[in-house]
């Protein structure tokens, strides 16, 4: 049973925010401009991004609303009625509620009755996990159609008040705490949605899902990107182990962190996974027409290019396409937002029979995920 | 760049690039995966994890150097043994290996100086025997290098050279930062980065010369896997006493 992506949708909250306006939205911590912002923004080369908070750091859209908006656009563009959707799979790093799962909330917001739901919790690669579960569900012929949504509201973690409250954290102690500030200038908000069906759309192009594969290396590496601990080796507590949530926040256990020194490992494992797929004959680099690679920053683009070339499985740069630079790094939502715009952009020509390779690495604890799509026409 | 493979070939490489035969190219891709897996698994070795986590101490460094010394001493022995096992049809590779051995056969002296600079007593490092992993690694390498024309040892060089470069790239400075030790205590690690470019070029030339069929490729890859596993065993054993 072949499964096809027959419709897509995306939602980016608010107006595009330019590089120099970013700190105005997230807020300057204790009123002082960041000394790292320019350096990090120069490296990631993201020109505009979107936030679901305003310049007073008040939430303008919940994560559920963003997911629902992207899903609505996707369903409005579909050739089937909503009632045909038998499964809703939702991926996010952090839903609006710690419980229940985000899929319940998105289902309610969309008013979709009595369908099967799944919440995939992770970071960037959770989108691929949700997609794979939905794909398999259709392959097992349990449903005719499944809606997969990924949504990310990172800015609530990145607003100045979070850092100001963390008075006992490494961020407060150190003059410059690169690991705690790094993601502040990288991540932003948005949502994407894909409709999966057991047949191609009657008009236009559909994308057949050929395979989805993932390789996680959490057994070997320390955690690299996380929320929930104070970022001190000697302190093994996670946020709920503190007597009060207030104490956890003071200690910095609710700040988003990236161990920047470990980051190269995700690129190397990404290349290892692709070499594995190439050696197994699952993917043929020469036959990839379009490469949609979720990289978090321009800085990593060249590294991935060099690594793939060094391994003899390079994909020429002209076949790469991304909207990172205008839509921002929206974590779990990135791939779907990318696919949605890729199908509509004039920048590339897309033909029946072409092969699209998607790659979503997740630095959280080193998960690498890959997907191949083929462009089809009914 | 992937250490150990800074000049691996690709189709769009210029005329200066190295043109590997198809068997050597396929072998190199497999070696690359062996390397990446080896490097990943090193992150699970307790002492090396402390470098990642930032809890590595001066005592750890001394312990690591004490354990590495035997491997370095034995390294020059198996490599010269390997050179003598190549017949005249392999004169080119024999020359390369001999000159490589000349480059490195007294590296352990550097390591001893590092040990003293990090506060260790010379007599302690001189008295240190091979740990369990070093025994296994050395035994295996001497066995393979005693066989006629042991081309599979390219797989061993791939791992050991790659680790040399990794030490230079990601251990030396980090160790100084964590322990407050100076360059004097990490010269052995840092030194391996300098020669690496040359060594890898020679490596590719050798691979192209000897990796001419699937059988050769398979033997090289297998030896690289065994060496990767035994090398990790050696590093896992550094904290275990020899008694």
Image (cartoon, grey):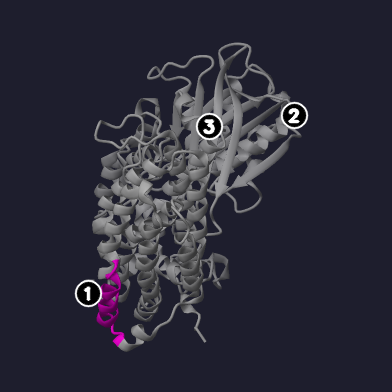
* Residue A370: x %, y % from top left: 53, 37
Mark 2 secondary-structure assignment:
loop
Residue drawn at 37 percent across, 68 percent down? B77
Whether B232 is drawn above or below A55: the answer is below
- The C terminus of chain A: image quadrant: top right
* Residue B97: x %, y % from top left: 32, 56
Circles 1, 3 touching at the beta carbon (< 8 Å)? no
Residue drawn at 46 percent across, 55 percent down? B148
Tell me the tag on residue A283: 3
Whether A19 is drawn above or below B238: the answer is above
Q: Which residues are magenta?
A: B105-122
Tell me the tag on residue B133: none
Q: Is residue B90 magenta?
A: no
In the rendered image, which residue does mark 2 sit on?
Answer: A143
* Residue A86: x %, y % from top left: 73, 30
Q: Chain of mark 2?
A: A
């Amino acid at each position: 049973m072949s499964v096809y992506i027959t419709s897509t949708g995306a939602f980016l909250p608010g107006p595009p925010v330019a590089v120099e306006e970013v700190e105005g939205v997230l807020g300057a911590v204790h009123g002082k401009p960041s000394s790292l912002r320019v350096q990090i923004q120069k490296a990631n080369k993201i020109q505009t991004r979107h936030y679901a908070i305003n310049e007073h750091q008040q939430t303008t859209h919940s994560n559920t609303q963003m997911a629902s908006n992207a899903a609505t656009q996707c369903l409005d563009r579909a050739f089937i009625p909503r009632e045909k959707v038998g499964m809703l799979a939702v991926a996010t790093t952090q839903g609006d509620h710690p419980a229940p799962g985000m899929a319940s909330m998105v289902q309610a917001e969309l008013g979709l009755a009595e369908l099967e739901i799944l919440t995939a919790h992770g970071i960037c690669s959770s989108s691929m996990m949700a997609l794979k579960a939905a794909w398999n569900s259709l392959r097992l012929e349990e449903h005719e159609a499944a809606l997969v949504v990924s949504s990310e509201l990172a800015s609530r973690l990145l607003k100045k008040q979070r850092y100001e409250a963390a008075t006992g954290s490494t961020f407060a102690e150190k003059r410059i705490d690169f690991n705690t500030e790094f993601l502040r200038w990288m991540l932003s908000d948005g949502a994407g949605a894909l409709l999966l069906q057991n047949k191609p759309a009657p008009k236009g192009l559909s994308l057949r899902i050929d395979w989805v594969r993932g390789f996680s290396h959490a057994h070997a590496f320390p955690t690299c990107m996380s929320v929930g601990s104070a970022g001190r080796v000697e302190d093994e507590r996670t946020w709920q182990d503190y007597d009060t949530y207030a104490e956890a926040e003071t200690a910095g256990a609710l700040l988003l962190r990236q161990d920047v020194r470990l980051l190269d490992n995700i690129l190397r494992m990404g290349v290892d996974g692709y070499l594995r797929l190439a050696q197994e004959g699952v993917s043929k680099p020469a036959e990839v027409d379009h490469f949609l690679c979720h990289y978090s920053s321009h800085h990593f683009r060249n590294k991935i290019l060099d690594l793939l070339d060094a391994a003899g499985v390079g994909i020429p740069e002209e076949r790469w396409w991304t909207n990172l630079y205008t839509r921002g790094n929206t974590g779990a939502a990135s791939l779907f937002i990318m696919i949605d715009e890729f199908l509509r952009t004039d920048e590339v020509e897309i033909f029946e029979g072409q092969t699209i390779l998607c790659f979503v690495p997740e630095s959280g604890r080193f998960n690498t995920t890959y997907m191949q799509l083929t462009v089809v026409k009914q | 760049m992937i250490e150990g493979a800074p000049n691996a070939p690709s189709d769009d490489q210029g005329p200066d690039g190295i043109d590997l035969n198809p068997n050597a190219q396929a072998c190199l891709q497999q070696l690359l995966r062996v390397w990446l897996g080896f490097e990943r698994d090193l992150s699970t070795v307790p002492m090396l994890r402390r470098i990642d986590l930032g809890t590595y101490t001066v005592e750890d460094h001394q312990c690591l150097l004490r354990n590495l010394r035997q491997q370095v001493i034995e390294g020059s022995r198996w490599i010269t043994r390997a050179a003598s096992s190549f017949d005249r049809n392999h004169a080119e590779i024999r020359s390369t290996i001999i000159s490589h051995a000349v480059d490195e056969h007294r590296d352990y002296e550097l390591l001893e100086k590092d040990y003293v600079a990090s506060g260790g007593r010379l007599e302690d490092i001189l008295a240190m025997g091979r740990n369990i992993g070093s025994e296994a690694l050395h035994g295996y390498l001497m066995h393979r290098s005693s066989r006629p024309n042991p081309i599979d040892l390219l797989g061993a060089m791939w791992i050991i050279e790659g680790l040399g470069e990794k030490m230079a790239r990601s251990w030396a400075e980090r160790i100084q930062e964590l322990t407050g030790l100076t360059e004097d205590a990490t010269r052995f690690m840092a030194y391996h980065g300098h020669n690496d470019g040359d060594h890898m070029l020679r490596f590719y030339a050798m691979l192209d010369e000897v990796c001419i069929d699937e059988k050769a490729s398979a033997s090289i890859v297998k030896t690289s896997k065994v060496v990767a596993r035994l090398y990790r065993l050696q590093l896992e054993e550094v904290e275990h006493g020899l008694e």
